[in-house]
Amino acid sequence: MLFEGVMLRKDKRSLLLSLVLGDGCLFYHKRKNKNYGAFTVAHSPAQSDYIAWKAKLLGEILGREISLRKCSNARGLSTNPNAEIIQISASWKRFKAWRKFVYPKGKKDKSKILKFILNPEMALAIWLMDDGYVEGKLDKKYNKCYNANLRLFISDQNKEQCLKIQDWIKLNFGFETKLKMQKTRGKEYPFLKINSFDSLILWKKIREFVLQFKSMKHKFRFLELRHQYKKSLAQHT
């Protein structure tokens, strides 16, 4: 089991919305001239273990098996039109109302999700695995990493939404983040930068969860190297 004990409605909502914070998408689909709500998410084949875990989690919440489907850039979920991706999708009656709430005017507002999150550490770990990046400097001679900073890309959220996300992180994890902008394909997108000290503290909290996925080890390698280096120093003092 991925979740111990009986899942209450609020537990299911928290877990499902944790998947929507990053790459997950709520959408409408038509069947027999009637609109239904659905959830979908896709990852590259290199992250097959990660999306298989999401499929299992989704299946346990909804009480049915969720199949993995290989396809070519389904629903435009990759910037590469020819990319092969692995996708999972599921319909559920509550997704329709959630889509309306989370996507005012058809655009995802991540800040609306945060008040329903019951496990901030798990939610932020998933969010970082989806949309995070580690900026680090590596001394290859000594296999030592300097200044491993976490970045969390938050797509096209506006200033007010960004501030609410920063407040949520401050409230739940006790540290400040810096709001930065990065230019991609001629448009600027916001991201949150976490300093090296706070990144390492956060990493200690989520590393066991993240490193269960082999596909995530390379992405977070700088933080893990820094963690192991600090651990080694502590053992020799």
Image (spheres, rainbow, N blue to C red):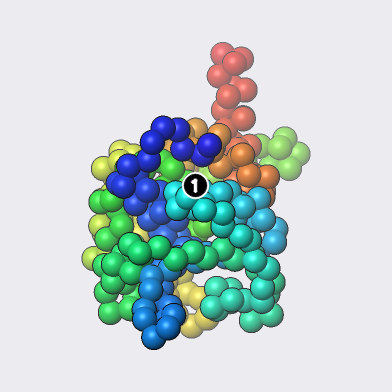
Residue 229: x %, y % from top left? 62, 30
Q: Residue furthest right?
A: 141
Q: Tell me where residue 80 sits by quadrant.
A: bottom right
Q: Residue at x 59, y 76 (%)?
A: 74
One can see residue 149 in this view: no
Position of 142 with respect to 234 (left or right) is right
User: In this rendering, is residue 49 above or below 204?
Assistant: below
User: In this rendering, is residue 181 above or below 210?
Assistant: below
Give the crowd class for mark 1: few <14, some 14-19, many >=20 residues within 10 Å. some
User: In this rendering, is residue 217 above or below 100?
Assistant: above
One can see residue 225 in this view: yes
In terms of secondary structure, where does tag 1 sit? helix
Residue 46: x %, y % from top left? 70, 58
Q: Residue at x 56, y 57 (%)?
A: 66
Residue wearing tag 1: 60
Q: Residue furthest bottom?
A: 33
**115, 29: nearer the viewer:** 29
**102, 148: nearer the viewer:** 102
